[in-house]
Image: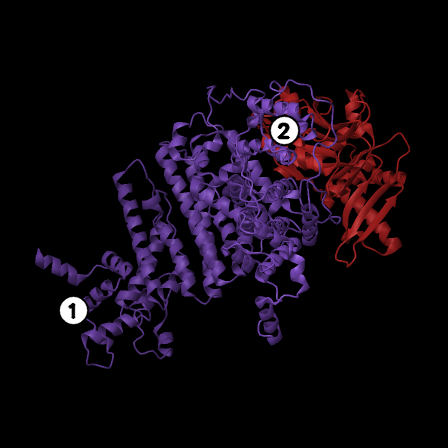
Chain colours: A purple, B red
Amino acid sequence: MQRRRISMTPKHQKGQTDLSSWRKGGTTDPEKSLKILQFADGEKNESQEVSLEQALNYFANERGRVLLNKSSVLQKHLAAVETIGLQQGLPPEGFEILLSVALSGRFVDAVNTRLLKSLIPASEIPQSSVITAVSWLCVSKCSDNVQLLFIKWLITVFDFIDCKEQLRALYGYFFSLLQDDRMCPYVSHLLYLLTRKENVKPFRVRRLLDLQAKTGMQSHLQALLSLYKLFRPELVTITLPGKMKTYFRNSDGPWKAAINAVRQRKQQPSPLFQTLFLSTSQPRSRKRKWNVQLVIPASSANTNHLGGNRGKSLDLNCQKVSFPVEQLQTFPQFLQNIHQLELPAQMASVLTNPLLLHYMNCVKDESIYLRLYYWMGQMLQEECTWCVADNSNEEEFKSFLETIYKTECFLQEGFCASAEFLCNCLPLWDGCCCRSQILGLVSWIPPSIFSEIGSQLYDPLAQLFFTSSLYFKCSVLESLKELLQNWLNCNAVHLESELNSSNTTLSGLVNLVAQLIHFVGWISTAALRLEHNSMFLMFFILNFYETVCDMYLEYKLPLLILPPAGVFYTALLSMDSVTLNQLCYIMYRYRTNLVAAKENERSKKKILQFKFSNRTYQEYNQYITAMVGCLWTSRVFQKDIHPQGLRMDDELLEKTAVKEFKSSFNVVHHPAMMCYSVDFLKQAYPDDTTYNFKLIKGKKWDWYLQYLYAQGLNGLKVFIESSINRISLRKAENEEA
Amino acid sequence: NPQRVVSLLHKAWALYSVTPLFRFSRARLQNYARLLRVQIGAELDIKVVLSSVPDLRGSQQDQAAILVELSQRSQGSPRSSEDKLVWSGWFCSVCGDELSENMPEDFACLPLFLTNGAETYTAIVGNWFQKTFDCCFRRLSVSPLNLSWMAAMWTGCSVDKAASALELVFSVPRLPHSLDISYAIHPEDAKALWDTVQTTPGEITQEEVDVFMDCLYSHFHRHFKIHLSAATLVKVSTSIASLHCDGILKILQSQYISGVLMLLTELAISQIK
């Protein structure tokens, strides 16, 4: 590739060397005098430091060819970049702009050199910025010195570049730069860092040997050749002289010291240097570790297993061709190559690769599960921020838990490793750290593991539950509801797939579910008292029971458990219609399930042949009597036979000084329904300002009910229609018939 | 080759627990050495050797130990056969049946990893193993409870040569400057105490260990009025071996190498499960 050399105009050169004249301050620079005036004014302090963002903006937008000596603005911004770069290092986003500026020749060489020298990374360098810089290199807009400085910089900060795949793809371009004599040593060093086995090609070896013949035995060429020989000994047949201590001249330049200084200032080694520097730790404090990093590895196959011959890769089916996992991008590709897929070297990489997760779902390979199980178990144990002392990396751990949770949602099943981890860490958990992630993971614990560790989970969970805020309580109830749903779904799937599901697993699941529901019933009752019957809390509790009431019909699980009295009566006597409506719906669903069970029993169907005990029916009847008596017949205080119910003597009720206590909880007078009845009266009798609820009777009662249904109280509707046998309706039906 | 195993003595080993290695093949040790060599970098003059040491194992179910050695060729004449050992690492399993019981064929169970040498090399070798065999290294931390077990067990072992003192090092928490208390007991006194505590030879119970430690604590308290039971035991040194809670081991007697490694294998497995 031909490289144009820029000829520098004399004017340009003068500008470059005139820095000192500017400093003498003899010229009447209008900008400069303005600066002095402003400084004197004190309004805008020009000598204030420019922020990095301002400097980057300036460099990104400055278009014209600015001469250094003429522009103090340029000086200011340049100085800002330098100071920030040398003190704390530049953030990743700054590199793209500054590299483009430095290599595009927009500014003079002095500016470019100063910019390149201040490119100290704070954390890492994005690959895209380096690729952009190399593309500028191709058009040779900047001078040779700057290009050389860029290559030196690239060598020094090589380890900071976050990903090097695209850079490796440019191997051919870098190789072509070898022909320039000045750049050759540094480009060789760069190639030394970039070379991989597949880059060693015969024509490249020949090229190197030619260069060597031309220029003599140079240490950098020797280095590259010996590396080539290591990868492909058959291609490099010459004998290379012994062992050299240093192949490459120290091309670190001014950056190495600055990088070290920045690092020391941060007082913790950058994660990339972890492997290269001994950690300076105090005794018994947590060292920065090389072995355990919460980084989910990229999916790449393991060429190391294949021995010397890359060409023949045998997979499970002993077919010669295998599809490398790095190339797996789309789902059709996955389907085509599903039998030849080369599995990744580190199974942990499936966590972020949905296609490989599909593979895990389909292929029942024990080794895959085991590998993932061990890795996940070790990571969770090691990085748990509250189990391990001195570990304060909460954000990282939180996102790790989040990844696991998302994977579990994708696979629709939980991991054993995460379930065991929860068992260990929940007793030590404070309820705040990574809360939604932990509760999310709780909802995916598989029933098989829960049966072993259940008691170890219930106790700490209950402890946290009772001592925490309303929102935590609601979150726990939500996650327990999801846990129940996951178990039920899992069971439903099993019933469909295996027609002869063993009785033991089904009864085991029934016991587990019953245990869970009783646990939730217990904590709900206590929580309602603690939170003074909060409507928000009641919503979550009733949500849970909405799942519970339909277990028989929806999920084919022969179990029916009614809510405890503490929940039922609190809901029945609540102050808001949403709760009442929800309760009505739930009781309706219970009825439907019980009726269906009775019918199935009578018809003697093979599946679902299960009889609910009489006690269940009794319990339900007690509740329904109370409810109907409360909402409809106004006889709850006499008729309620539930041991924890509302049965009260008239004398006691008279002491309350409430006039019409008998009807005080029916659909008209119930505190939850009061707003509706008032509204109804307003519409029915617009002129009447005294709200006479007694007017709602007979035909108006029916209209009132229709009005309620129209307001969206669907639960109430289905409850009344199913549980209340109305004489008037029957009469109407008979009349019609 | 008993020579190899003896090289474990008198060196400070950093301990790690390793999850089972996937598709680790003993036939390919040379291949692995070559790949590891590339990983280390062509610049430094390091020779990598991986070898299998069948002597170091507990039962027949255990896999033979794997030794990784990194040596630097001497600076002198290239023909010199003197290579300086700069780093060595042992993968071993002594009576690690608990882990290897139901393990599928593809996995090699070598849960204990010992390393001696610069940590930079440990990092390189460890990272390569993690990437190649999908395993996980974790620093083995030993709880004070387990350390007191070691103290009791090793005191009970008899040594032919002159025994060194039983030394316990405690760290006192929650002080502005960290304080270490070192408590050394004459080995014969310690053994005599242990002999009175232990009831059944060959068997040790938790109660016996507790009694042993309590005696030592109360003796200390009588003299110095300090309750060592409130401090944290961090290091135990006996004439057999010394162990630090951060997972640093030194073995001093060749006949007890297996025994010590058996205990540590157990600890490593408990850290994996």
Residue at point 57%, 36% (across, down): A374
Q: Which x, y percent locates residue B166?
A: 85, 41
Q: Nearer the viewer, residue B128 or A234?
A: A234
Label 1 vs label 2, nearer the camera? 2
Q: Which x, y percent locates residue A494?
A: 39, 36
Q: Which x, y percent locates residue A288?
A: 67, 46
List the residue tagged with mark 1: A699
Where residue A88 sits, quadrant-wise, is: bottom right
Residue at point 31%, 52% (across, down): A589
**Residue closest to the far front:** A10
- Crowding at dot 1, Cα within 10 Å, few <14 / some 14-19 / many 20+, comes out as few
- Crowding at dot 2, Cα within 10 Å, few <14 / some 14-19 / many 20+, comes out as many
Residue A57 lies left or right of residue A284; in this view the side is left
Determine if residue A698 is in view: no
Where residue A579 sits, quadrant-wise, is: bottom left
Subunit ID for the residue under disc 2:
B
List the residue tagged with mark 2: B109
Residue A595 lies left or right of residue A94; in this view the side is left
User: Relative to residue A208, is residue A599 depicted above or below?
Assistant: below
Label 1, secondary structure: give it.
helix
Determine if residue A65 is in view: yes
- CA–CA distance in space, label 1 to label 2: 82 Å
Q: Which x, y percent locates residue A409?
A: 44, 44
Circles 1 and 2: CB atoms closer than 8 Å = no
